[in-house]
Image (cartoon, rainbow, N blue to C red):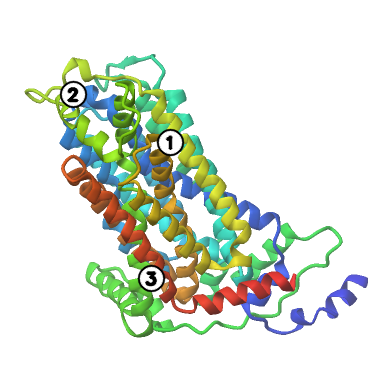
Amino acid sequence: MDTTTTVSKDAPSKRPVKLEEAFLMTKFGLYNVCLIAISGTILAAVLLETLGLSYVLPVAECDLLLTTREKGVLSAISFAGIICSSHLWGFLADTRGRRAIIMPTLFLAFASSALSSLTTNFWLITVMRFLTGFFISGPSATIYAYLGEFHGKRNCSRAIMGASFVFGVGSILLPLIAWSIINQEWEFTIPVLNIIYRPWRLFLVVCALPSFISALALLWLPESPKYLLSHGREAETITVLQSMYRWNRSSRDPALVLTGLLQETEAQQTKVRREEAANSKSVVGLLKQMWHQTAPLFMGSYLKRTIIICVLQFGIYLTSSGMYMFFPDILNRIAEQQAKGVERITVCNAVYATRFDIEELVNLTNGTVRPDVCHQKLDISAYEHSFVLEASYALGFAVIGLIINAVGRLPILVFIFTLCGTCGVLIVFIDLPLLAIWFYLILLTCGFCISVVNACAVDLYPTNLRAMAVCISLMFGRLGSIVGSNLVGFLLDTNCELTFWISGLLLVGCGVLSFFIPHIYKRQASERISVSSR
């Protein structure tokens, strides 16, 4: 009787409420923390699947008979798979459901990655790594929309940055896992497959485990409430909200009673079109619906915001991934010059001084790798530098997650872009190797902006276009990774300075472009009000 009286005084429970108001009623607690942890693990899985191969290539060249050109192909093939499938997964996530795409693609990514550890030649591992990228693309972008749609505007940015912090912690584990597995000396033969199973093969499987674990965790999680409500599934939405409340409430709180939810206004897509998309069976029908789902992003008021988000992601990935692929190589060249007694030298002069030695080192004859370049271990310095970078990411994501509501997104974007871009330009002139290395590390931390830009994208589009928008923007980001890697590889030995000028000035330009993100000033003010109202 007392409980009934308490609930009756709760006005929102006696009338239909907006979903934003319902999120406030469910509170922020254990359910949200678990969701953030799982989402962060999925983001970490994407990192392990795409960048983990960089530790494998130097030690697998003899087993797979890899030429330098083939190593370059393998470095980019996962990103190519991501680009090819981003559009498809974005469309399916908006029409079939976020969870319905994330969970199966995680299982498929794990399977293809595990199979790639058993390959015996370049073509087989190329195909399997392409499939890994193809499938991991599903959760890599959709997870932002999925996580954001369990939170109201007050907590959306903080939740995404919380998942990014978990991702940062997971990224720290990458060099540690690589060091603990790859630098082992055991091996055994599998006669049926005619392969020698070495530590690098096990490392590929371990990198795939977060995908498998995350997929299992999603078996116990529902579809996002915003997606359910946007598709007219009000009863299911209320069930999810009540489940969230049960996890988050204390034992003294009354039960959550919701009589109804007010439908959100959706732009560019009618209920009939949604049903057609969900029921479409033919390839032509599927392509037609994909066009209807994509076209609004490049029309009307959405055109400006889509272009801005895509350009920002392209610039971020070009530097954070493209320059990262050559980070260990450049550091080794600097170390080589220091070993010869050279105390003051610029990064690019160190590159020029060692380019002929490097070319002789990787020279291949008759399609086989020279025995003297066969390595089963990596130098410890490669792990140390990677660990410092990943630790910086983890700390940075934690700080951004704590201050983003108070400071706002625009100051964070402008500060990071300007700082990283300036450091990139200054690297050209600095002749103190240690200082140049630290500036190089700062340049690579522009990846902080990826999650901030994704948080902006989640708020810039309605529910029916959100996943597609994020997928399209990240597709341009992955394209930036491929362009950056090839650009640096092409220019490094001949015009090293230009690579740093391009990345540095591009980031500064992204900082300027951030001012033109629609509503970013209004949203910044809203976030400050949310914090002060607590």
**Quarter-of-image position of residue 203:** top left
In this image, 181 relative to 358: left or right?
right
Please, is residue 212 above or below residue 219 in the view?
above
Which callout, 2 or 3, points at the residue further toward the start of the chain? 2
Question: Residue under circle 1?
Answer: 386
Disc 3 and disc 1: Cα gap in Å? 30 Å
- Quarter of the image with the C terminus is bottom right
Q: Which residue is mark 3?
A: 513
- CB of mark 2 within 8 Å of CB of mark 3? no
- In this view of the protein, which residue sits in the foreground, 63 or 96? 63
The amino acid type found where label 1 is placed reads Ser
Q: Give the image quarter of residue 315.
A: bottom left
User: What percent of the width, then of the height, locates residue 85?
Assistant: 30, 57
Identify the secondary structure beneath mark 1: helix
Give residue 483's position: percent from left, percent from top.
Answer: 24, 53
x and y percentages locating residue 15 in the rendered image: 72, 85
Query: What residue is shown at x 23% (from left), y 51% (from top)?
Result: 498
Q: Give above or below for 3 relative to 440.
A: below
Tell me how far mark 1 sits from mark 2, CA to CA. 23 Å
Label 2 packing within 10 angstroms: few (<14), some (14-19), many (20+): few
Label 3: few (<14), some (14–19) or many (≥20) C-alpha neighbours in 10 Å: some
Residue depth check, mark 3 versus mark 1: number of the one nearer the observer: 3
Q: Which is more N-terminal, label 2 or label 1?
A: 2
The image quadrant where one finds the N terminus is: bottom right
Residue drawn at point x = 23 percent, y = 27 percent: 120
Residue occupied by mark 2: 361
Q: Nearer the viewer, residue 223 or 161?
A: 161
Query: Residue 108: horizontal and vertical position, in percent?
Result: 37, 46
Give me the residue at 86% from left, 61% from top: 252
Q: Earlier in the sequence, mark 3 or mark 1?
A: 1
Residue 142 in the image: above or below residue 276:
above
